[in-house]
Image (cartoon, rainbow, N blue to C red):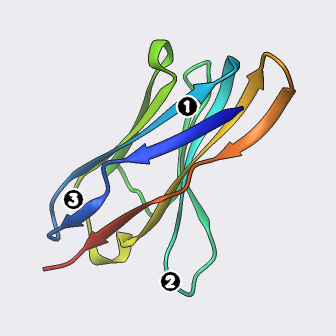
Amino acid sequence: QVQLVESGGGLVQPGGSLRLSCAASGSIFSIDIMNWYRQAPGKQRELVATLTSGGITYYGDFVKGRFAISRDNAKNTVYLQMNSLKPEDTAVYYCNADIWTTDRGRDDYWGQGTQVTVSS
């Protein structure tokens, strides 16, 4: 069984920074795409950033150079460095990964989410 566990959320003032982490564990053979999504109250979940195993990145238009996604393949961990945070970045941030397991083949997995609140 595979688990994704996020950490690093919290309360930060506008203009501040946070670094989110998402560690995958379990019967992992390999991890292809790793994503960060977010969902604000009353809004649909939206894609924040993507990082493929080949190093290709994608960011939502609203990121505008403020966030950076990275991964440590040895630790099966993906990070999201968020700088210049704005109140509109307030949301629950979710980790998502496309994972090949040793016993169930390929599947899509989600973490439980971590709250990010940007407020003065």
Graded by Cα atoms within 10 Å as few (under 14), some (14 to 19) or many (20 or more), the crowding at tag 2 reads few
Dot 3 crowding, Cα within 10 Å, few <14, some 14–19, many 20+: some
* The image quarter in which residue 68 lies: top left
Residue type pointed to by label 3: Ser
SS class, disc 2: loop
Q: Secondary structure at mark 1?
A: strand
Amino acid type at mark 2 = Pro
* Distance in Å between CA atoms under marks 3 and 1: 27 Å
**Residue 69: percent from the left, percent from the top?**
43, 37
Q: CA distance from mark 1 to mark 2?
A: 26 Å
Q: Which residue is mark 2?
A: 41
Residue 54 percent across, percent down from the top left: 61, 18
Q: Earlier in the sequence, mark 3 or mark 2?
A: 2
Q: Which mark is residue 24?
A: 1
Of marks 3 and 1, which one's residue comes earlier in the chain?
A: 1
Q: Horizontally, is 53 left or right of 36 in the view?
A: right
Residue type, label 1: Ala
Residue 117 in the image, given as x and y percentages of width and height: 29, 71
